[in-house]
Amino acid sequence: MQLMPATAKRFEVRDAFDSTANVRGGLAYLRWLLAYYQGRLPLVLAAYNAGENAVDRHRGVPPYAETRNYVRLVLGVVRAFAHPFDPSVTEPSRSIFGAAREPGAARP
C-alpha cells in the first residue's frame, strides 16, 4: 500500500517497507476512511488518493484528473458505491456530513 509518511506515523507504521506493517497500516487507514466518509466509496477512494483534507476542502471528489481517474477505475472494478463501516472508529467528516449526529440519527 502507498502510505505517506504522516499517514504511516498516524497509523503506527514504523517501517513502511515492512510489507506486513505496511498492509496493516493501510488497512487501518482504509477502515478509518470508511467510517469518516460513512461507507461512501467515491469519497473513501478520493481521500486515499488525494488525502482527506482535499476531499473535505472540495466537499467531495477533488477536481484532480489523477484522483478522478483513480476513483473511476476502482469503482469500475468494485462495482459498488457504498461499503459497510464501523461508526465507532471515528466521527464522520463535518465538511461532508455537517455536525456530528446522535447515535441512530438518520443519515443523508
Image: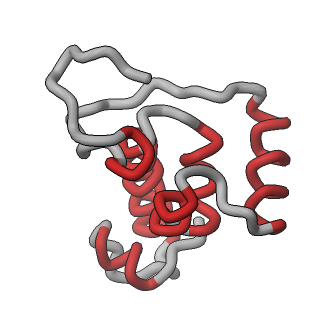
Q: Is residue 58 left or right of residue 16?
A: right
Q: Position of residue 7 (x, y in %)?
A: 40, 73
Give the image location of residue 104, x and y in percent. 21, 15
Left or right: residue 91 compared with residue 50: left
- Colour approach in the figure: secondary structure
Residue for point 37% across, 45% down:
36
Q: Quadrant of the C terminus?
A: top left
The front one of 61 and 48 is 61
**Figure check: 8 above or below 83:** below
Q: How many marks?
A: 0
Residue at 28% in and 71% down: 12
Left or right, residue 29 beside residue 50? left
Displayed quadrant of residue 20: bottom left
Percent position (x, y) of residue 9?
Answer: 32, 78
| Viewport quadrant of the N terminus | bottom right
User: Observer-nearest residue: 25 or 6?
Assistant: 6
Residue 72 position in % (x across, y down): 82, 46
In terms of depth relative to the viewer, which is nearer, 101 or 85? 101
Task: Identify the residue at image location x=51%, y=81%.
Answer: 17
Among the 4 quarters of the image, the one containing residue 55:
bottom right
Outermost residue, left side: 102
